[in-house]
Image (tube, grey):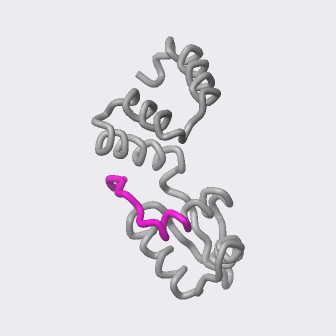
Amino acid sequence: MQKLTRLPDTELEVMKVVWQKGSGVSTSEIKQELDKQRAWNVSALQTLLNRLIDRGFLTSYKKGKNKLYDIVVEEEKYLAFENQSFLKKVNGNSVTKLVASLYNSRSISKKDLEELAEYIEKNAGSDENV
């Protein structure tokens, strides 16, 4: 598989719909979902889908008159890639700096911190994420 790269916002918007709908989704199904937020031009959407194929995020195939898309890069894998990149670039790989910044800017609440503490306590002994 190709090395993951950061997706531009519009391509990410399209991928979020594909991840939500799952493999085997058609261009028209993707457009229908995207149109709920704003109107999309079919040819622009097809261009973005072709870019996602070129980047290795999707594959496509024809079924009758429809072009269908399958997911190659799962959402969880992409989110992990983006989060690692962000943490390294913005917070010097420090989760503590990230959480402190969010708390100090009032982006997260004391309740959020308590939930995070519970999560850490529950998962701290797990070897899966080490």
Relative to 103, say whether 81 is above or below: below
Residue in view at x 60 percent, y 27 percent: 110
**64 to the left or right of 101:** right
Q: Foreground residue, 2 or 121?
A: 121
Q: Foreground residue, 6 or 60?
A: 6
> Does the magenta run of residues contain 4?
yes
Relative to 23, say whether 53 is above or below: below
* Residue 63 shows in this picture: no
**88 to the left or right of 30:** left
- Residue 39 is drawn in which quadrant? bottom right
User: Percent from the top left, x then y, of residue 98?
Assistant: 41, 35
In the image as oriented, which residue stretches furthest toward the top?
125
* Residue 34 shows in this picture: yes
The magenta stretch spans which residues? 1-14
Residue in view at x 57 percent, y 62 percent: 70
User: Percent from the top left, x then y, of residue 18?
Assistant: 61, 62
Residue in view at x 61 percent, y 72 percent: 68
